[in-house]
């Protein structure tokens, strides 16, 4: 499943990164905990943010059986709705910020990834961001901003679903994709 998301240089990129982290960015994420741990419906489930120069996408991947795919879609849509209507609790916001900051720092460990990051900054921003500046931007994100971004991203008219596999007799209606 996916929705359009802001481009790489958008002013609210750290809000979008934090939303993605909380939604499906690891084993403590909402999707992993709900779909895999609570319901046991998918071995693998995660969300991924793909920002480009003029657009982007936020996609959710779930590896499940055809017998469970509609239930998985409904659970994902339920998390979309929850992010739109409920402010993220402070402990979840803190956990997501810490995870995102750790991922950013770990992503700069090798010389190759550091040089790729500097090239991206030059191409998209014409400015080099220090690690402290990035950490400050992540820390500045509020739960209200995350909820506002969820309302922007999770527009039912923009949700796209791709199903791959043996789907004999499976029907998906527009109503099932309301978030």
Image (cartoon, helix red, strand yellow):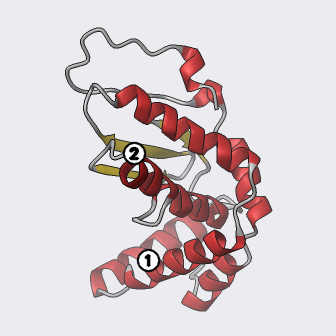
Res 48 visible? no
Picture coordinates of residue 116, whole percent (x, y) = 37, 74
Q: Nearer the viewer, residue 55 or 43?
A: 43
CA gap, disc 1 to disc 2? 27 Å
Q: Farthest residue toward the left?
A: 166
Q: Residue furthest right?
A: 144
| Mark seen at residue 39 | 2
Against 26, residue 69 (above or below) is above
Residue at (74, 64) in percent of width and height: 143
Q: Residues within 10 Å of mark 2 (few under 14, many from 20)?
A: few
Q: Residue furthest front?
A: 38
Vertical placement of residue 171 versus 76, above or below: above
Question: For the point 41% across and 26% down, which residue is it?
Answer: 70
Q: Is residue 76 above or below residue 147?
A: above
Element at label 2 = loop
Q: The C terminus is located in which quarter?
A: top right
Mark 1, residue position: 103
Residue visible at 33% across and 47% down in the picture: 40
Asked if labels 2 and 1 touch by Cβ distance under 8 angstroms, the answer is no
Asked if one can make out residue 83 in the rendered structure from this viewpoint, the answer is yes
Q: Is residue 169 left or right of residue 118?
A: left
């Amino acid at each position: 499943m996916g929705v359009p998301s802001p481009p790489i240089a958008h002013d609210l990129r750290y809000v979008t990164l934090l939303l993605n982290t909380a939604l499906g960015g690891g084993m403590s994420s909402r999707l992993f905990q709900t779909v895999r741990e609570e319901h046991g419906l998918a071995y693998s489930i995660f969300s991924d943010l793909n920002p480009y120069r003029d657009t982007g996408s936020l996609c959710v991947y779930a590896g499940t059986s055809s017998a469970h795919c509609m239930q998985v879609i409904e659970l994902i849509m339920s998390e979309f709705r929850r992010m739109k209507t409920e402010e993220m609790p402070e402990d979840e916001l803190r956990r997501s910020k810490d995870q995102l900051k750790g991922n950013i720092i770990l992503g700069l460990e090798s010389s190759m990834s550091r040089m790729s990051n500097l090239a991206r900054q030059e191409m998209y921003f014409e400015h080099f961001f220090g690690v402290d500046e990035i950490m400050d931007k992540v820390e500045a994100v509020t739960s209200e901003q995350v909820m506002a971004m969820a309302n922007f991203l999770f527009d039912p008219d923009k949700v796209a679903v791709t199903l791959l596999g043996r789907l004999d007799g499976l029907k998906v209606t527009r109503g099932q994709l309301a978030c």
